[in-house]
Image (cartoon, helix red, strand yellow):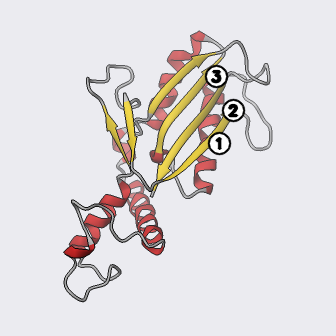
């Protein structure tokens, strides 16, 4: 999975997304991204924030993208390594989106009968909501999963590794007596933050 996430097309797409975020932040007047990385006083005399040397632009872009930091005071054990963080700190000034619970039904209302398919669709639905706000799965800082059957926990971990490996949000998983529809097996809610 890690090799797939690092493919040239994935990296190019991520770079394009990062450039859009940086431009949006700068258009909104955000010119001091990180005192330790770049400040207006570090610009050459007479320079504007829009005409920075390439090295400073890279430093600026890096600082804008780091809107959250993962905190793990002790190692995350298997099977949750790579898909879980003990805590996630969000930087002041980040855009924050709270996503309502998403279920495994397609936008047309089709619902698979098995847990893994419903879970994949719920995460796909979550991704669609994030994209509407110019965010992506990597921007998730908190996930909540609601499952109706304990036997689906191993499948949940498998789907998370498949679709969310490397995201590492703070996670809460709760087993519930039921969801709104008796056919729903999983519901996923999220909080995401981005520059």
Q: What is the x, y in percent for residue 73?
A: 26, 26
Q: Which residue is mark 3?
A: 115
- Nearer the observer, disc 2 or disc 3? 2
Residue wearing tag 1: 125
Confirm or deny contact between disc 1 and disc 2 (CB under 8 A).
yes
Q: Nearer the viewer, residue 156 or 71?
A: 71
Please identify the quadrant where the N terminus is shown: top left
From the viewer's side, name the closer residue of 39 and 17: 39
Which numbered mark, 1 or 3, is in the foreground of this view? 1
Measured as percent of width and height from the top left, residue 67 is found at 39, 51
Q: Which residue is mark 2?
A: 103
Whether residues under marks 1 and 3 lie with C-beta atoms below 8 angstroms apart, the answer is: no
Lower sequence index among marks 2 and 3: 2
- 132 w.r.t. 57: above or below: above
Going 30% across and 29% down the picture, which residue do you hit? 72
Left or right: 103 in relation to 82? right
């Amino acid at each position: 999975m890690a090799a797939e996430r690092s493919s040239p097309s994935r990296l190019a797409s991520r770079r394009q997304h990062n450039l859009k975020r940086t431009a949006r932040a700068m258009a909104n007047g955000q010119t001091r991204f990180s005192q330790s990385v770049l400040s207006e006083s570090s610009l050459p005399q007479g320079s504007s924030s829009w005409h920075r040397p390439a090295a400073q632009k890279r430093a600026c872009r890096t600082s804008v993208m780091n809107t959250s930091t993962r905190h793990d005071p002790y190692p995350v054990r298997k099977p949750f390594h790579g898909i879980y963080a003990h805590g996630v700190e969000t930087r002041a000034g980040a855009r924050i989106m709270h996503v309502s619970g998403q279920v495994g039904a397609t936008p047309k209302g089709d619902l698979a009968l098995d847990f893994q398919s419903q879970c994949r669709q719920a995460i796909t639905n979550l991704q669609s909501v994030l994209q509407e706000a110019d965010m992506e799965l990597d921007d998730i800082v908190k996930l909540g999963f609601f499952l109706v059957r304990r036997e689906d926990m191993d499948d949940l971990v498998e789907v998370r590794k498949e679709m969310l490996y490397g995201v590492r949000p703070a996670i809460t998983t709760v087993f519930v007596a039921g969801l709104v529809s008796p056919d729903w097996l999983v519901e996923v809610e999220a909080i995401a933050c981005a520059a």
